[in-house]
Amino acid sequence: MFSERQQQIIETAIKIIAVNGVQNFTTKNLAREIGISEPALYRHFDSKLHIMEAIIKYFKNQMQPAIQKLQGNSNSVRKIENFVLEHLNIINQNPHFARVIFSEANFQFDEILLLKMTKMMNQSLNKLGAIIQKGQKDNELRSDIASLTISRSVIGSLRLLITQWSMSGMIFDLVAEGRKLCEDLRKLIAEKQFFLQ
Amino acid sequence: MFSERQQQIIETAIKIIAVNGVQNFTTKNLAREIGISEPALYRHFDSKLHIMEAIIKYFKNQMQPAIQKLQGNSNSVRKIENFVLEHLNIINQNPHFARVIFSEANFQFDEILLLKMTKMMNQSLNKLGAIIQKGQKDNELRSDIASLTISRSVIGSLRLLITQWSMSGMIFDLVAEGRKLCEDLRKLIAEKQFFLQ
DNA sequence: TCATCAAGTTAGCAAACACTAACAAAGATA
DNA sequence: TATCTTTGTTAGTGTTTGCTAACTTGATGA
């Protein structure tokens, strides 16, 4: 998909955006950080915009394992749990992701780019929504609250946890804290027979 | 605090960032949108950075009513509810806020600016956290889950709802949807005697 | 009446921006 | 061996950036 050099460019771009913001993501900074000249970048990408497009594709690939946790034939509660934990796992291994992937603002300067970002976010949200509805049908999840509220609570608290971890300078153990969150979320949204699973 | 012209500059800046992203927030665009010349901006602010600082101060003032809902002598559940609803109310009246205030990325290019943003966010988070702990002590809120999980669920789902509303082009009724969210959240986090309040 | 002053204007600055032209070197292929 | 392709280089393009200098204008007040 991407050559080694292209991957290096993408990863360095993500790092720059995460640490210094989109406004400091310039071809000059990017080239210097990698250790090549500016025009060399254009041997691997047509333009700066194409690099940003590649970042989104790169995310899609990296986050795939998390979404796959929503498939399979285990129960809904377990699926949601694995979905959340895999998210945290991936972010933990790619700490720079957090400040880029959950900040649509970084891509807001270009309509098409923003559309691709929101599309990606909505896809995983819809898949989670379907699992939650099935879980409610199967009496695994509480049915006295809207499925939308459940997915908003799950994704919302997940995103907030990641944001807080990132903004704090990653001073706490994301995965450990995530496991606690998962346990509590299960208590909140699961029917009682699933509390102790 | 701010002169009329200053307010106009701040509000227009917010609008530009919300609609076209920080990257398109230039002195040229700002001046054109207002209908004055570029140098005229510098009669009211020392620099572009000072305008961004002013945006944060402006937010602080506008969001104050929401935080004040956490004070007073009603019960914790009601306080949290009013806090959430007032947030939605303010955002509903200032639709451009959503994409700026909840996107730390917009201020990431400058360390001091980012610090001020996170400080502001943490202040309201801490105040909410205190109310939640008190609510648990008073047996108004569930005590079998961590207070941090409750505040993350409340703030997380609130922020996600606002983000979704903003990204959808504000096609649904934010306040109505927020009221439903509030009801469901109360069912999730309140002890039973507070379900029907 | 006339100096003061706030708040606008036009013209233009140096630096930074994304990107290109032209050339060089090294490895693969014929 | 000779040529082509890939991937790098240096030098430089026109445009945009945030911001300044110098001038104007209309209201205020001693």
Image: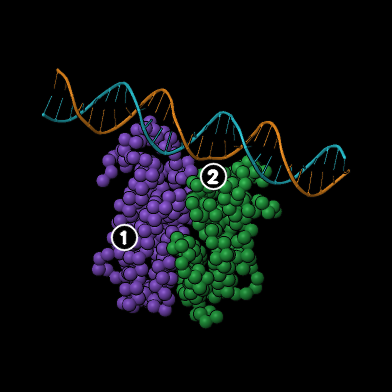
Chain colours: A green, B purple, C orange, D cyan
Left or right: where A90 falls relative to B124: right
Location of mark 1 (residue): B67
x%, y% of residue A6? Answer: 65, 51
Q: CA distance from mark 2 to mark 1?
A: 39 Å
Direction from residue A76 to residue B126 in the image, left or right: left
Query: What residue appears at the point 31 percent right and 77 percent down from the top-left corner?
Result: B138
Determine crowd level at label 1: few under 14, some 14-19, many 20+ residues with C-alpha closer than 10 A.
many
Identify the disc placed on residue A26: 2
Disc 1 element: helix
In-front residue for pair B34/B196: B34
Element on which disc 2 rests: loop
x, y percent for residue A81: 55, 72
Amino acid beneath label 2: Thr
Q: Nearer the viewer, mark 2 or mark 1?
A: 2
Q: Quadrant of residue A101?
A: bottom right
The chain ID associated with circle 2 is A
Name the residue rendered at 30%, 62% in the picture. Answer: B69
Would you place residue A180 above or below residue C1 in this image?
below
